[in-house]
Each structure stands twice: as structure tokens, then as C-alpha cells.
Amino acid sequence: MLDKALKGGKGYWIWIFFLFAVIGVGFLFYLKQLSLGLGITGLSRDVSWGLYISQFTFLVGVAASAVMLVIPYYLHDYKKFGKIVILGEFLAVSAVSMCMLFIFVDMGQPMRIMNVLLHPTPNSIMFWDATVLNGYLLLNIVIGWTTLEADRYSVPPPKWVKPLIYLSIPWAVSIHTVTAFLYAGLPGRHYWLTAIMAARFLASAFAGGPALLIILSMIVRRFSKFDPGKEPIQAIGKIVTYAMFANVFFLLLEVFTAFYSGIPGHKHAFQYLFIGLEGHGKLVPLMWLSVILAAASLILLVNPGTRKNEKTLLIACAAVFISLWIDKGFGLIVGGFVPNPFERVTEYWPTLPETLITLGVWAIGTLILTVLYKIAVSVREETAGSDSSH
């Protein structure tokens, strides 16, 4: 089926070459980072995780969100998700690939990644994170590819796939839970030291991932003959609504706990992010933009009229995605490090090389997604044609 990715119109190839150009620029700057070290990033002694790890954290959520299609389709026999579930599984493959690349670029010496394999340490959360991510990537490749091949020949998928599908459901929850444990288990970081960190991660994942899937489904419909269907998009829109509500609710619980308890360590991170601390407030405008977009998206999603209108649904999903990217793909990580345990404020902002390397990784993920979607859409167009001819 890979040959289908090599056939496409002029627009398709322009898009592919554009992605390769972005990857090329990112790779050149990565070589510079490899030569000079992480000193070319905005990271410091006080802020040792930055844009790379925040992207990893955000994208684990995007990957985990595929389960919101798998559960209704495979467990509850919700047939309307039949066309769209493959798009969710291939989105997970792309997202996990980017997760791994972000860990790779964050390592000062990438060969250190081999230590995870050569010297496994089961008492380390990092070891389990690597294990569950690799497992989830493999599961989604096998499930997605096998079910698509079966669809191509209009035969049921082989029976051995069913147990893998059921295994992928708790596995999806586990990848984001383990990622949350990386943060929630650090006693010196008050902003992350919360029992509901995993719940917050899952709520944001089940809002942000499906919101991106709705946007991608509409793009697929616009540029191909494959229509994922209006009903599935509306059903996913409801999932986004409930998950976004849960995400905002969890965040407000954190705000209440921090300020009602009056514990300085818990308050300082919120103060730094939302009003600034000791004259430092680089992230304040970004965090308030996230709040405004979250509120606007909920207004559009809760109202059935605007949710059922695909144009306003698209705007709402874009608002959800950007809001969560700011909160989780940037603010959450930096907020945990600022101020440091000695209550000193060392601000962080990504440098140009760091940003271009990040864009390069996103371009690799987008290229993987484009190729997988091209294959899936081509197969769907074929099967739709053969169905109509019968």
C-alpha cells in the first residue's frame, strides 16, 4: 500500500517538499546543537526542561486521544466511527513518533538513549515511559495497517487483531498516566505536586487530540473525495466539549487549592504564569490568551447551534487546540521550574535554534501523518468506488 503515497497531484508534492525544507532547516540547527550542546537553547540550571519536553508532554496526549474513537467503535459497536477510526490511529502513530524525537533532541548526547535499552532501570519512571510509548507506537502501526489492509480487500480483519485492539485501550491511558507521574512525583516542584496531575493530563488529551482530529477530518474532506462523515464529527465534537469542561474544572480545583491553602510554593507558580512575579512575567500574555481561547471554545461547544455548525465547530476546535498547547505545551513545564526551590525567578524563553529544531520535529510528524493519511484516503476512495459499482 505504500506505493499510494507516491501518487499525488501538484499541491500534494508542493506540501511534501515544503515539509522536507522545514525538516532540513531543523536538522541543520540540530547538527549545530549536537556540536555546541544545549547551550544554544534557552535552558539553564534552573529550567532544565523547556520547549522540547513540553512538546513531548503535549503530543503524548494527542497520541492517547485515539482511544476516544477506539472505545466507541470496537467496544460499543458504534459503526458511525468506522470511517474515521483509522484517522485517529494514524494520528497516534505520528504523535508518538514526534514524542520520541523530542526526547531524542532534548538529550545532550543522543547516544544516551541506548542506556535505556542497555541498562534498564524498572524503578525509574523514565524507563516505563519509554516502554509504554514504544509499545503504543507498535500497537497503532499494527492495528491501523492490518485493519486498513482488510478494508482494502473488503474482508474482516484477522482475529488476532482483536486482542491487540482491546490491549490498546488501557495502554493509551497508561502512556499519559506514566507521563503525568514524571511530574507529579517530584517533591520540590509544587506546581506539579498534585494527585490529579494524571487526571488533568487525560482530560486535556481527550479534548486536544479529538479537536485536532476534527480539524484534520475537515481538511481530508476538503482535499479528497473521502468524507469521514458528518455524524462522527458531531459525536467527536461532544467528546471535546465534555473533556474540555473536565480540563477547565481540574485547573480551577488547582487554583482553589493553591490560593485557599495560602501555601506560598503552590501560589507562586500560578502568580508567575498569570500575573507575573517580582517583575518577571514573560508568559502572562500567553497564559491569558489560553484562558480566553478556552472560555470562547466552551461557549461555542456548549451551544448546540454553534457546535452543529461545522464552521463554528472548526473555530472552537482550533481554539481548544491552541489553548491546550499554550497551557500544556509550554506553561505547565515552565511553571513547574519558575520560581526554583530557593524562590528565585529565572525566566525561560526558547531561542531561535530551539524553535527551528522544534518546527523540524513537527514537520517530520506532519510528513508521517500526510503519508499515512494519503494511503488511508486512497484505500477509502478505492473501496467507496468498488462499493458503488456493486
Image: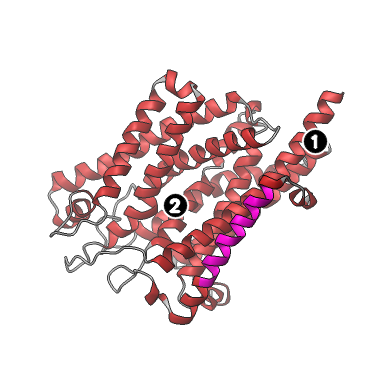
Colour scheme in the image? secondary structure
Residue drawn at (74%, 50%) of the image: 5
Residue position marked by numbered label 2 in the rendering: 58
Queried whether the magenta region covers residue 19, the answer comes back as: yes
Q: Secondary structure at mark 2?
A: helix
Queried whether the magenta region covers residue 250, the answer comes back as: no
Measured as percent of width and height from the top left, residue 13 is found at 68, 51
Q: Nearer the viewer, residue 338 or 260?
A: 338
Question: Magenta residues, as a range?
Answer: 12-28
Q: Earlier in the sequence, mark 2 or mark 1?
A: 2
Q: Nearer the viewer, residue 147 or 199?
A: 147
Residue position marked by numbered label 1 in the rendering: 382
Q: Residues within 10 Å of mark 2 (few under 14, many from 20)?
A: many
Res. 199 in view: no
Q: Residue furthest right?
A: 390
Measured as percent of width and height from the top left, residue 268 is found at 18, 55
Dominant SS of magenta comes to: helix
State which quadrant residue 89 falls in. top right
Residue drawn at (53%, 37%) of the image: 215
C-alpha separation, residue under disc 2 versus residue under disc 1: 35 Å
Identified by mark 1, the residue type is Glu
